[in-house]
Amino acid sequence: MSLELVGVGNHFNQTGLSSKEAENRLKLEGYNELTVSKKRHILKLIFDIAKEPMIFLLIACGVVYLFLGDTSEAVLLMASIGVIFLITFFQERRTEKALEALRDLSSPRALVVRDGQTKRIAGRDVVRGDIIIISEGDRVPADSAIINTDHLGVDESLLTGESVPVEKIVWDGEQKIERPGQQSSSFIYSSTLVTSGRAVAEVLSIGSKTEVGRIGKSLVSLQPEQTLLQKEVSLVVKRFATWSGIICAVVVLSYGLSSRGWLDGLLSGLALAISLLPEEFPVVLTVFMAIGAWRLSHRNVLTRQMPVIETLGSVTVLCVDKTGTLTQNRMTISALAVDGSILNIENNKLEGLDEKYHNLVEYAVLASHRDPFDPMEQAIREFGFNTLAQTEHWHANWELKKQYPLSSKLMAMSMVWSKTSTDYFAVACKGATEAVIDLCHLSSERSTKILNEVEELAKQGMRVLAVARTKVLPDQIVESQHDLDFEFLGLLAFKDPIRLEVRSALQECYGAGIRTIMITGDYPSTAKVIASDIGLKSFNGIITGEELDIMTDEELTKKIKEVSIFARVVPEQKLRIVQALKANDEIVVMTGDGVNDAPSLKAAHVGVAMGERGTDVAREAAAIVLLDDNFTSIVNAIKQGRTIFDNLLRAMSYVIAMHIPIAGLALLPVLTGFPLILTPVLIVFIELVIDPTCSIVFEAESSAPNIMLRQPRKLKEKLFSRRVVTMSILQGVVILAICVFVYLLFAWFGRGVEYARTATFVTLIVSNISIIIATRRQKNIDVRNYLSNNKTLLWLIAGIAISLLSVVYVPILQTTFGFMSLQLIEVLFSLLAGVMSWFFMKILAKVYMPRSESF
């Protein structure tokens, strides 16, 4: 059916804009696209990384060794800098792409009227005042007002979250633009999808001034927060860096002002500063997050921002977008009603359909398009094919003769079909119940009965359409369907079914102490039914978008403590909900899949997007993407996050404990005048090679059996608690005492500085392994336990053994590290001394922390 360019009043120019007018507006107002935030220049990124304390210290050491002519030491230090730099650079380059996705989405091709002619142009070239023509399957290029329409239906789920298309009517030229999602609206919005009909519209807003553009603006203003763990680790490292710098300066001055020399003082000071600075913390954190992300990827969870994996373990509130997250984001026929008899249907399937429902389904199919975009019509055709395809009620060969479109005056549509071997046409009608009742001219009594059925179905969260039929002779086709006399057939009830796995996943969240809030753009009655179906607990009332509008932030922050359902909300309101929860010191996860979810996904501590049904905007704004859209994958991610924190606690404890002997051995020459025991190269070797490798052992630890039965970690609970730090220091002191004993013993027997350094280093490395064994969460220590529960440990011991043999007995490495070849008895003595530290640490654990599994 053709659609003439007929305007309303005098506000519409049939010829559209002239090319000159369009060019001028393009220059004045810009392109129809979103402003993309500026990317950080690569040189700025390199400079930011170079400002890290550890990088600065290593560079300083490398410069000193180059000045002294010791190129091998300098090369090793520079290689260490390269390792740290590459890890940091890789992480920093994972920048946000949300605005780019929004720009691409908001710039489809557009059919416009320019100079009285229709022409197709790039969506970014559309300007305010352009006349556009849209039809079924098109993306709307800009926010516009409807000038003329032929049964236009638009899917606005990208903006509202609701999958049911909204019908459009002609703009009166004066009404102001409304929010998306309103039925019988005169406005269409950028990036939404036309599901049926055609229309002519006048562009009112472009680019960042559109509805989707406002979402883009909110994304620009929202900056991803550091996780709590990142903040804590960063603070600890900065404090240690400050004290390390002060101590380094004191050592250099004491050496320089005495007779021991400025260069020796500089090397000693730098070595001590490096030993005190726990630069492994960010490295270990990176290792844990990277391997955690790899493990989650095997469970269909893609991690875009790795640090949030740990945050998942601390989640207290899960904000769930209903459509596409709790539900499948598709309409299915859920019930049929004929003459007061209601047939409930599960999952849009029936083994057999009773004869009395055949006419209802048959004419519902005939009242729909054969290749529909509309999700309700898709559900009707799918159900009709499943139940009627092998019967005489399926009419694939009938010919469409006329269509009566839906209008603002009559919310019903009819299709006129030519039947085979008959002299009359069949007319099928479907639409709003009130409209179909009117077309059927029903009595007041029967109308009331039908409307009561509709109300009953609506209370169950269903959307209802009525179906009717009639027949006419070819020469009796009238201009208005209202002039036909229809027979009422019954009701079709539709529902967006919940995901089957949601209920069990939700119960597991409750067991883990995680509160769940449902946020939806749907009506309160529908939201309440869905909440009941999935087992949502403790929903004391429902807050609607209108109620939210009149609430202050303080009122919302207070009220949100007891309300678990928000209905009829819009994007900026979702953002307010997340911010109110954060104001209550909650750790918030937000799930979603539409453009409307992007700001709240980015504002939440953890944004979780759906990968299959989700938009590019949602996926790019989120920290985590569920590749299978499976709600249970969120629970798996939370479990992984809790496991990571448990194991990270042990790894950080280990790092603190190992810094004590390293710092002590670096400080001993300063206090006693002994030669350097641990040179900067040896310290870097231990901290940047062995320590990160050892952290992999802790990362590979399995989850505790009761990990999803615990309450979430408190917001203010510190990773570096007094209990953990004290125990770690005690462990480190034990290892330091053993290493000093070995060094003094070798020095006492006159074996020389190189022999003493070698034996002490072997003892330190073996103690390193001992502390890993003592810190693991194992009640019974035996070989079978370690081989079966954590095979990484076996590989670690083998790798360290090979490394030790290499640096002690390979000549070129001996010279580089300042070692000498030890005799067998000396090696055995050093090994035994290192193993003894395990016994002392187990005694400490029983005396100081008898109930702790960590030690």
Image (tube, rainbow, N blue to C red):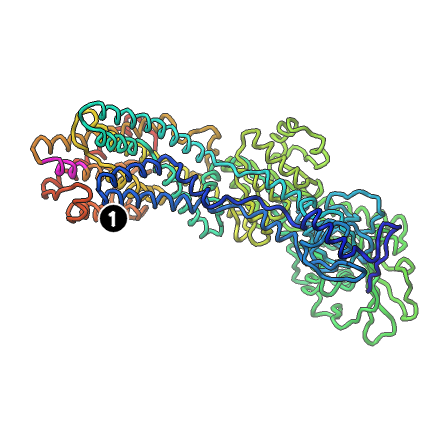
Q: Could you tell me residue 603's position as x and y percent?
A: 57, 38
Q: Residue furthest left?
A: 749
- Does residue 716 sit above or below 204 in this rendering? above
Q: Position of residue 31 (x, y in %)?
A: 67, 50
Percent x, y of residue 679: 22, 36
Question: Along the horizontal axis of the image, is 150 left or right of 301?
Answer: right
Asked where in the image residue 404 lies, by quadrant, the reply is bottom right
Could you tell me what secondary structure mostly forms the magenta stretch?
helix
Q: Is residue 302 visible?
A: yes
Q: Nearer the viewer, residue 301 or 791?
A: 301
Of 553 and 372, which appears nearest the observer?
553
Q: Amino acid at mark 1?
A: Gly
In this rendering, would 695 be left or right of 424?
left
The C terminus sits in image quarter: top left
> Does the magenta-highlighted stretch encompass residue 755?
yes
Stretch of the chain drawn in magenta: 752-760
Quadrant where the image shows the N terminus: bottom right
Is disc 1 placed on a helix, strand or loop? helix
The image quarter containing residue 504 is: top right
Instruction: Tell me where residue 590 sits by quadrant.
Output: top right
Any part of residue 463 in sight: no
Q: Is residue 505 magenta?
A: no
Count of numbered labels shown in the rendering: 1
Residue 556: x and y, percent?
Answer: 65, 30
Above or below residue 431? Residue 252 is: above
- Around disc 1, counting alpha carbons within 10 Å, would you say few (fewer than 14), some (14 to 19), or many (20 or more)? few
* Residue shown at the point (81%, 51%) measured from the top left: 169
Q: Residue at x 41, y 46 (%)?
A: 290
* 459 displayed left or right of 593: right
Residue shown at 36%/40% (left/top)?
Answer: 284
The residue that label 1 is drawn on is: 799
Query: Toward the viewer: 716 or 436?
Result: 716
